[in-house]
Amino acid sequence: MGEQLKNAIDWLFEPTRYFAGSVLLLVAIFLGRKWFSKTIVIVAIFALGTVFMLWAPSDPDFRTIITKPDNVPIVILLGSVVFFTWLAMRQAVINDERVKEGKPTLEAELGKKKVFTWPDLVYIEFICMILFTAFLIIWSLKVQAPIEEPAATARTPNPSKAPWYFLGLQEMLVYFDPWIAGVVLPGFIIVGLCAIPYLDPNPRGNGYYTFNERPFAWVFFMVGFILFWVSFVILGTFLRGPNWSFFGPFEYWDLHKLEPLVNVDLSTYFWNFVGKPKPTNPLVREAPGILSLLGFFLLVPPILGKTVLRGLVKSMGMARYNLFMHLLLWFALLPIKMLLRWTINLKYIVGIPEWFFNV
Amino acid sequence: MADRGDTHYSVPSLNRWFAISSLALLIAALWMVLHDFDRPWKVYQREYQEIEVQRAKAALSTPEAQEAIAEEQRLASEIEEIKRSQAQGGGDLASAEEELILLEDEKAKADARARVAKQEAGWQRFLTDEHRVKHGEDAEYQEMLEELVERERVMMETANALKEITAKVEAKKAEIERLNADLEELETRMKLATKNIALVRKKLEELDPTDPVRRLANLVRDDIPGLDFVGPTLKVRMALPPKLTFELNFTKKPRIDMCQTCHMPIDKEGYTEYEQPFVSHPRQDLYLGSKSPHPIGEFGCTICHRGAGEALTFQRVDHRADDEEQAEEWREKYGWHKQHYWDYPMLPARFVEAGCVQCHKDSLEVIEPDAPKVVEGYKLFERYGCYACHKVDWFPTKRRPGPPLKKVLEKTTPEFIASWVTNPKAFRPTTWMPQIFHLENYSADTEVAISNYGTGRPMMGDEWSDAALASVTAFIQSRSATDPLPEIPLEGDPLRGREVFRLSGCLACHNVAPFTDEERAEVDDLAQELGGTNEHGPNLRGIATKVAPEWLYQWIKDPTAYWEGTRMPNLRLPDQDIADIVAYVFDDPDGFFHDVPEGWEPRLTSYKRDVLEEQARWFFNRMRPEDLEDKFQGPWKADRDLLVAMGERWVLQQGCFSCHEIEGLEDANRIGTELTTWGSKTVDKLDFGFIPEIFAKEAGFEPGSEEEYEAVHEFKAYRENFLQQKLHAPRSFDREKIKNPTERLRMPWFDFTDEEVEALTTFVTGLVEDEVEQARMIPTEQQLAVDTGLRVIRQKNCIACHVLEPGTIEFDDEDGVHHSVKGQMSFFDEDSVFPPSMEHFDRDLANYIADMRDYEEDPEWYPEELYAQLLETDVELGETGTTFAISNVASIRTTPPVGGRFVDLVMRYYVDPWAYNPETDEYDICLTGDPDGEGRIQDVDGEWRDFSEEPFDKLRWTYAPPVLIGEGEKLQRDWFFRFLNDPEVLRPQIRVRMPSFHWEDNEAGAVADYFAAAAEKDWPREYARQLQIQLGLTPAEIAQGIIAELGLSGSSAEQVAGIAEGLPVETAAGLPNLLAFGEAHNFRFHPAVNPIYERIPQRTPAWLKRYFDERPDFYKDVHNLVAGPGGPTCVQCHGLAGRPPTNATPIGWAPDLTLVRERLRPDWVRRWLTDPSKVYPGTTMPANFDLGSEQWQDLYPAPSAEQIEAVTTWLFNLDRALIEN
């Protein structure tokens, strides 16, 4: 029984299933938010989680990976993300109800009462700080710092992992060249986050949790943060093993596990399909990829703007709409590339290694 | 803060929270300090302090210490007495001291007065001068002048007063000193008496102070958390070897070994009775001790032991248990497991010698006595030819280990080749040739991957291997030249052949042992025993079924003609002898050479054509299938051609060419992994396959369980596990793997024993990247010569015939004192035919006792004493050749001499040439070729003689190969070198031949240098021993003499004894002093051997002038003494200028005297002439010149010592003397 359950979990944590499962879970939360925000749900989740955490560490592979000193915070992160997601959801659902009934939001209700900065804010902050410092000291005493072998450039550890908060970026490196995954996309993340207040045309939902008033923002945040950040951190921490191969949580990190990964460029598919040899000129050779990319970035915004997103164009104006769409399309490039990799083993949409230009 | 009443939170409750949280932070902070303070190593250091206190207290309670303490008390009371009497007497001393105080006071005042007066006078002089210059010599000037005179007077007066009072003070001081003299002397004596215990006391006072203030200070320094930065006595201790580094990021990081923090007395002597970590290193003489070659400050610990030197907990250091029991104990005690983040775990005790290799690549042979296992591994690596497939770039041996196959059909048949390759051990269980086919990864149940190449035919198992074997045989056959060899020109006599075979030296390297252990246990013939040197060449049993007679004849005649790099030497046997040996082998009266193991039969391997084709599809998978099928129908239509084509593939794939030279494959690449730095490879780079999991399963662990996880991880954590598994079952890493047949593992199976695997593992684990560049031992020319020489001696098997080192006898004397001397056991009694063997002394002794009990009819009979003879000077027992009795027979332990096993065989043959006849159940088979079957042996003059009644020693020195102990002192290096290259006949009566070896590079030179270097190295030791014996002084007396008589410093009794024991450090430090002492006492010892410059002073004109001034016919006179009647008649046994000895029978023959000049060293000749039995105990050469009496005065009137000198001079000028005669 236990063995079968472990195998089932390992099966589930295969990357495509893991990713698809995460998406489905998001959709389920989105649709069943009313049910999800019930107290019983969070109690049930934590009860089940506790049972799981009592049972699972009996497996040495599982235990090894979750008790590594530098992985312990990620385990804590898991619990806190679930809790706060639930909490925010709950507040939003309650607020939406209240708005529907014409009542003020919970936050507005609270906001009626004013309190002093001192002692009501600063004092409790100070106490928290002291307690947290004490907690950190005790943690560092009980869980020793994860000192590994002496660092050596010629003999890097396998797997060689970024700090946990960068594991999302590291995961992107699997699908893109470093200049995109390491420079362009993080750049857009920062620019995009800075641009949000200027792009957001929706005046509602300020200062309180809501869902109905900002469904798009909610979805966008959940996909970006939970799916592409938190879940990638979890994936990078617990599921990526030696040689950056995937391992189920109960699987032994076998150095010699082989993953058949023969990736093919889009141009190869195309010219094979046409039945002609690849042209020597890289621009001609990669024309299908270049054209699709150009189409993706130049045609999608106007087409969408003319059709489904007409309302958005209206409320944002052309300039803001285009900027927003480009940021969104860059963001979408990641799941698209991931899907293409998993479905048709696509290596590069545009692959010009001669110029170090690969997308 | 009071509650204002308008806040959201209640302020008092916030205050409470603040108090609680602050308290929590305080506790956490204190915990942190405690945690930092509480280190596991401190526990050990505290325990060690207790041990030190105990030891100090014990040291203070020894009788010597007690005596010193008593002396101290006695002196103290004496001092007390004197002081008391002085005080009581109210005496001179007290009043003198009081007076001194007053005088000192007065002196200070006088001094002040004198200074003031001096300054005032100076000032007045200046004023007066100034006035004269400005105003001239007026009245005021006169006044000032008077004032000046007055002041100068006062100055003089006060100065004189000071002088006076100073003198008084000095006088008083001298008086006090005089009064105190007795006291001071007593105090000095007390200091001397307590010199030895003072250090102990000091230590004790440090560790366990009686002074309460110090006690408190120690407590504060070591026991209060947070204050341990104030000069604690408990602290981290480390070794910082200055030249040793650690490779990190392409830079060299200095090594820091903190092991001493817990292993505190590791570099101190005498901590043997404690448990780890409170023990001394067991080999202080070799490691860590300040006088050892590896002092702790220069080498630290981890360079040899590995492990993480900078760690301070049991776990992080990466300790390593030697066996499962210890590991289990550690797990329980320390929660021990592999430290995963350290790539070079500590070597367990059984592999610890691996650490030697990195520095001692050029001196492995030299370190053998101290690192036997790793050197054994190195030798096995060479013997099994590992280097042929696995490159090790510094490995000294390069030759292909197996015989060439270019003319193999001259030697044997294809049928033999096929059966031999199938399983070499089936024919010769002791062979080094490994098995290549029919191994586990080609067994019938191996799964085969289905691919486009093969047709998917199930084809593993025997038929697959058989087809491969047939191909290999066909291929080797196709590459072998087939010119027929000439017929043997002579008719051979098998019986005479047996004698030649036994006496010429064949059995030095070969044996004819039966195949099974049971059969071997029954034989009573050294030639049929397996053991060391006679396993150098193959066991010759069954050889007649392998080789062709014509080939054997040519092979013995000139082995290099068939195999240039062979180690088989040319014995330069006469053709008739060779023909006799061949006749003996093929017309074999003993049945040795036609004997084959049960079931052995040479036959060609059967194969299936379709299996061959399937193999071809795999091997030629780059060919298009159609082309391949065309080839099957075309050029490979005949099976023979397909076999040859496939055979080449197989030979290339399995690497046969690495060991055997094969036509056309001379330059093929090695098939094995390079091992030069294998030990530095991290374990994650080793493919353990599924072996750890399979083993865990076999051990009964549930897959996925805790135990399985641990077992698998631990197995994979250590590179030695990989190596041991690889050596035991080289192809096991393919287990449970689906692999293309051409990609399977291909290391052959050597059937190593556990010991061999452990030794090889130790050696290969030691092959690491050179981390010790700067500290690496750079051998001196002498050390290099010794190392190379030892290697060549081993490779050429010199020690089969020649004794290099005498055996060791250990025993307790009547006083229970243990002795360990170089020597040999003497005969048990007069009736013994052979002296007891040193190798099986226990067995021989037990047999002797049993015999005597039967004979005496006394079940309690036990020998009262046994005799032994020294083969090396021993300070207590005497010079070489001394015979001594051992009364405590039960305490005797013997170690056999190094080399000379073949001597036993020759002796047995001369003394007792009978073999056991199972038919008659008696020893009645005459092994010699004696036509009458009486056990007589043919002498070199053709006569048949019976030697069974001859004294053992006489036979030993006449007919056996010579011993080579101290040979470097005897032979001139150049002559030795020439002799090795082209041996000349020295003793024609010896049937054993000194062979002509095939030397490569400078091998012969290395052997000659080795003996010279060894003699040189031995010289100081021998000097120190002889000095003690001849002057009758103990080391302590000599050391005292050096200090007292010569006024030299730095010598001690230990040092002198150390030189006599041959300790290099002591020798280097103390030899000059010892030589000076010998010089001062007119002690003469033959000078050091200088291998580079051969000095023969006897040939210089100055030397000769001395003799010719006295005797114009010097040469003639000596000639008369040597050769004339009535003298020692040397020519009776020695030849002279080609004239044979006058003694008729060969048993008395000795080398020609003409050889002396070029061959021997003059100092050795002098020693030899003086007393041969002190050079070679038991030699047949008599001591002709008796130093105690005057002989042959009519022939050469001079004292014996001068006669010896004259004969020596004559011998070294024999070329001139003979011309004159």
Image (cartoon, rainbow, N blue to C red):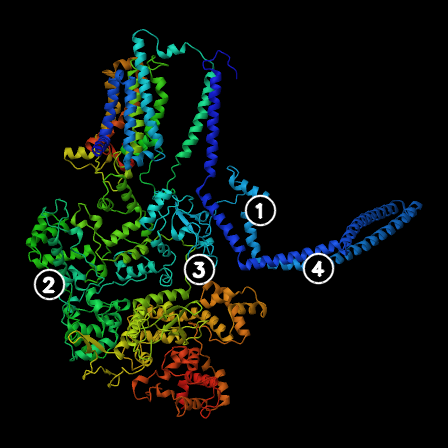
Q: Where is residue B1171, by image quadrant?
A: bottom left
Q: Which badge, 4 or 3, is on the more N-terminal residue?
A: 4
Determine contact: label 1, label 2, CB under 8 Å.
no
Q: Which label sits in the foreground, 1 or 4?
A: 1
Chain of the residue where label 3 is placed in the rendered structure = B
- Most foreground residue, A321 or B480: B480
Chain of the residue where label 4 is placed in the rendered structure = B
In the depicted structure, whether residue B784 falls above or below residue B1202: above
Q: Which badge, 2 or 3, is on the more N-terminal residue?
A: 3
Chain of the residue where label 2 is placed in the rendered structure = B
Name the residue located 34 percent from the left edge and 28 percent from the top edge: A76
Q: Which label sits in the foreground, 1 or 2?
A: 1
Name the residue located 25 percent from the left edge and 14 percent from the top edge: A310
Distance Cα–Cα, label 2 vs label 3: 59 Å
Mark sitting on residue B210? 1
Q: Which badge, 1 or 3, is on the more N-terminal residue?
A: 1
Mark sitting on residue B603? 2
Which residue is label 3 attached to?
B285
Mark 3 Cα shell of 10 Å, populated few (<14), some (14-19), many (≥20): some
Chain of the residue where label 1 is placed in the rendered structure = B
In the depicted structure, whether residue B916 falls above or below residue B261: below
Q: Where is residue A305, by image quadrant?
A: top left
The amino acid beneath tag 4 is Ala
Q: Secondary structure at mark 4?
A: helix
